[in-house]
Image (cartoon, grey):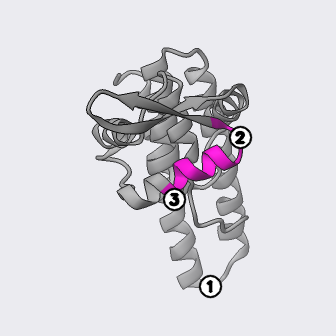
Amino acid sequence: MSHETTISPLPALLGFLMLGPRHPYELHQDFDRALGRVWYIGQSRFYACLKQLAESGLVTVKVEAQNSRPARKVYHLMPAGEAEFLGWLHRPTPHVRHIRLEFLTRFYFFKRLGLPGLEQLVDAQQTILQSRLELLDQAMAESDDGYWRLVLDFRRSEIQAVVGWLARCLRGV
């Protein structure tokens, strides 16, 4: 099992740009309003992520003049950015500890954008978690260390809770 510890907000920023071009402050407001109860990203990190997306060619930046105000940057999604976002959107979250951020963000965008495939994503997520449960069951059966079995049982309980939640999540929205 991989122990990846960071989650990138870049796909979520691309998702907001799927709704149309936006300037950074508006994007940050949209992000905070929609996902702020799930995911916090500070304004400085947010702006750094936008710069990273522009440097990678997934978005373009156009400077727009404003009457009696300084010009502002407006971010536009490129076809490569849309493809990157849609690929991410349809991939299940590989790590249980990332479900709260990644999976809930994916769920939000499926609903917000009205895209098909949410049921398939939920099924794929359940499949990944079921395979994790099988590995934990095997490890528990092979271990004679009481403490380790307790740790594995805790992890198993967490995954079972998420599997149960996934079974209910499509009915709740």
Q: Which residue is mark 3?
A: 97
Circle number at residue 145: 1
Which residue type does callout 1 highlight? Asp
- Residue 125 appears anywhere in the view: yes
- In the rendered image of this protein, does residue 7 appear above or below residue 126? below
Picture disc at residue 57: 2
Sequence-wise first label, 3 or 1: 3
Secondary structure at badge 1 equals loop
The residue closer to the viewer here, 122 or 21, is: 21
- Identify which residue, 167 or 134, lies in the foreground: 167
Instruction: Magenta stretch: give its range.
Output: 48-59
**The N terminus: image quadrant:** bottom right
Of labels 3 and 2, earlier in sequence is 2
Note whether 136 is above or below 63 in the view shown: below
Residue 50 coordinates in the image, percent (x, y): 53, 47
Q: Nearer the viewer, mark 1 or mark 2?
A: 2
Task: Say few, some or many: other residues with alpha carbon within 10 Å of mark 2 (under 14 / 14 to 19 / 20 or more).
Answer: some
> Which residue is outermost to the front?
68
Residue beneath the point at 41% across and 35% down: 23
